[in-house]
Image: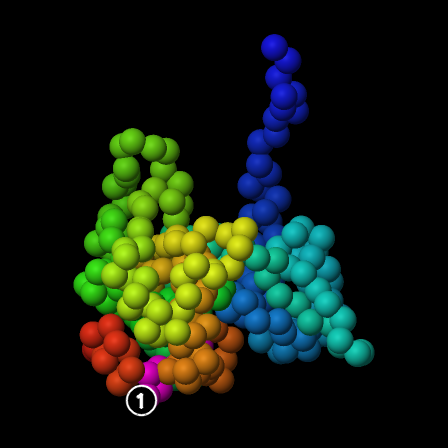
Amino acid sequence: MPDPHPLKHQTDIARAAALIADPSRAVMLKCLADGRALPASALAAEAGVSAATASVHLAKLVAGGFVTVARQGRHRYYRLAGPDIGGALEALAIVAPALPITSLKESNRTNALYRSRTCYDHLAGQLGVALLQALLDRGVLTGHDGIHRPGEAVRDRPSSYGHDFRYELTDSGRGQLRELGIDTDRLPPRRPAIRYCVDWSEHRHHLAGGLGAALTARLFDLEWVRWGVGPRLVHLTEQGAAGLERSLGLVLVEA
């Protein structure tokens, strides 16, 4: 019987890594890691490079499939090509060494990222990890305890980042989420409903996938969370803290 897939290719990890390896491109990718589109001028400012240099870097990221671009008037807006890119950046951050902190501003921003941020279109940091734990404690999800243990694997199927432990939505969980205004039967199509990322700052799991995106979008709609002043930064509002405690029993204790 002929092989239905006669051409088999290995992935070019070196090429992908080379695109991320440049410090300016790495900064731009991190700025785009919240899933929003940003103009080239904002990315140039964050990376500390000229507009012309930023244009060259962004062209390479677009050509490599890491970033997409759309024109609005005279401006071009860039965003990550999809959640898999955000997940790859989050995974790489787990093994990456820490950047030196040289100012109070950098220290404050780092602390803010640790507290609450987005990982593409879902919540991460202390808030994201605590949210997943609350969903487990309330019986909305089941399947794992949310703790990342390097080397731990499920024996009955191959290990794959975000898939090797299967979180499942319970029947009672569907009802609890419905009370929050989330219809679990209408999650984004062509995307796994429930996945997780290993949070690089907390080294625990946070909720990703279609459900993670829908829950995060709902929290923004309710104004329980709001965007911060920098890329990826998210702040839990007083209304949000009260709402999450009331609905999910989540009490975020800041370190």
Q: Which residues are magenta?
A: 233-240
Dot 1: few (<14), some (14–19), or many (≥20) neighbours within 10 Å?
few
Q: Residue at x 62, y 44 (%)?
A: 15
The image position of residue 101, as x and y in percent, is: 40, 73
Residue under numbered circle 1:
238
Q: In the picture provided, is 131 more to the left or to the right than 72? A: left
Kindly indicate the quadrant of the structure image that contains residue 147. bottom left
The quarter of the picture where the N terminus appears is top right
Q: In the picture provided, is 42 more to the left or to the right than 126? A: right
Q: Nearer the viewer, residue 80 or 48?
A: 80
- Residue positioned most to the bottom: 238
Residue 152 visible in the snapshot: yes
Kindly indicate the quadrant of the structure image that contains residue 8. top right
Q: Residue at x 48, y 66 (%)?
A: 121
Residue 27 visible in the snapshot: no
Q: Nearer the viewer, residue 157 or 13?
A: 157
Q: In this rendering, is residue 66 above or below 238?
A: above
The quarter of the picture where the C terminus appears is bottom left
